[in-house]
Image (cartoon, rainbow, N blue to C red):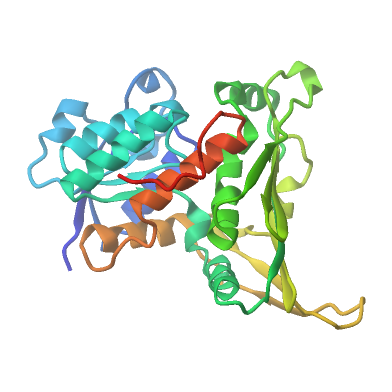
Amino acid sequence: MKKIKIVQIGVGHDHALPTWISLLKQSDLFDVVGWCPVADEAERPIDQRYFQKPRMTLDEVFAVPDLDAVAIETDDWNLTEYAQAAAEHGLAIQMDKPGSASQEDFEKLARTVKAKGGVLHLGYMYRYNPMIKSVIAAAKVGEYGDICSVETHMDCEHPVQKRQWLAHFKGGMLYYLGCHLIDLIVQINGIPEKIIPLSYSSGYDGVTSEDVGMAVFQYPNCVSFAKTSGVESGGFLRRQMVITGKKRSVEIRPMEEIVSGSLQITRMRDCVAGRSWNDEGVHSATKPTDRYDRMLAQFAAIARGEIDNSYSLEYECQLHRVILAACGYEIDYKTPVVL
C-alpha cells in the first residue's frame, strides 16, 4: 500500500497538534515530510513534538519531489489562502473547517480542486464517528420515520481570552464549533427553507464576542437547531444530537467522552415511539477510538484513489453557504451550487 507523502501547513488551528500527532502515529498510511508554520505562527510557542520532523518554508513544501498531500492547519482565517496554493499545485488537501468566512474564496478553492481533479477533505470529525454515521444513515433511509426535529449542542467552558478571540468571526461560537452541528443537520434534513440566526454575546467577564451561538433551521414539517456555548460548565459532556422521528427517537450524548488520552467513546439512547414515558430505551456505546485517526485514515484512502469522497465539492459549498447564513451573513444558500 502506497504511503501518502504529506506536509502539514500551519500550526495555529486548535486541531493542528492532534492532527500532527495522528499523522505521525499512522506511519503505515503517511510519510510525514515536515511542517511549515505560516503568517505569525513562528512567533508563538511551538510544541516540541513538531520538531520530530523538519521545519520547512512554503517554497520548500511545494518543491518536495512527489509530494501527494498537505494538511492545512493554520489559524482559521488563513485556511483557504494556503489551501488555494496547495490546490494550484494539484495536491490532495486535508483542511480544517469550515474553511473561510468568504463564500467567494471558498468556492474559488472548490473550483480549483475540481479543475485539477484533486481532493478537498474537510475536518468535520463527527462525520467519521461510527455511531453518528450509523444514526445519520438510518435517518436517511426512514428508520426513524418522518423527522420532527434534529436538536444539537456543542458546548464547553472557554477562558476569557478564548471567548474574546471568537470576535474574529461573525457568529462567533456558531462559526467556530457550530459548523460541525450544522453539517449533521444538513446531512439529515437537507437545505432549510429558512434560517434564523440567534447568536449573541453573554457579556460575562466583559467579553464582547458572540460566545453563545445559535441558529434555527425551518423545514416544511420540521424545526431543527444548533446551539453552541463557550460559557457552559461541564458543557463538553453535554455535546449531543437528538433526532426525533415519528417511529423512533435517538439521543447521542455525549458525542465524545474522553476515556484515556486521545481515546473517546460515544453513547446513545434509542427509544421506540409509543412506549411509556418512563421507558429508558436501549443504551449503547462505541469502543474507544481517536477522532483524528478515523478522519485521517479516510483521507488517506481518498487520496490514494481507493474510495470516493462521500462529500462532494458541491455539498461542501452548499454547506458552507448554510453555515455563513446561520452566522448572520446575507447569503443565497438555497440556489444549488454549480462549480
Residue 248 percent location from the top left of the image: 73, 77
* Residue 297 can be seen, yes or no: yes
Q: At 73% across and 79% down in the image, what residue appears?
A: 247
Q: Is residue 271 left or right of residue 301?
A: right
Q: Residue at x 79, y 21 (%)?
A: 203
Q: Is residue 211 left or right of residue 132?
A: right
- Residue 46 lies, in percent from the top left, at 41, 29
Q: Locate residue 267, reporting x and y percent.
A: 67, 68
Residue 267 higher or lower than 79, as above or below = below
Q: Residue at x 60, y 50 (%)?
A: 192
Q: Is residue 118 above or below residue 9?
A: below
Q: Nearer the viewer, residue 305 or 13?
A: 305
Q: Quadrant of residue 43?
A: top left
Residue 253 visible at all: no
Q: Is residue 247 left or right of residue 166?
A: right
Q: Quadrant of the C terminus?
A: top left
Front position in the image: 179 or 238 = 179
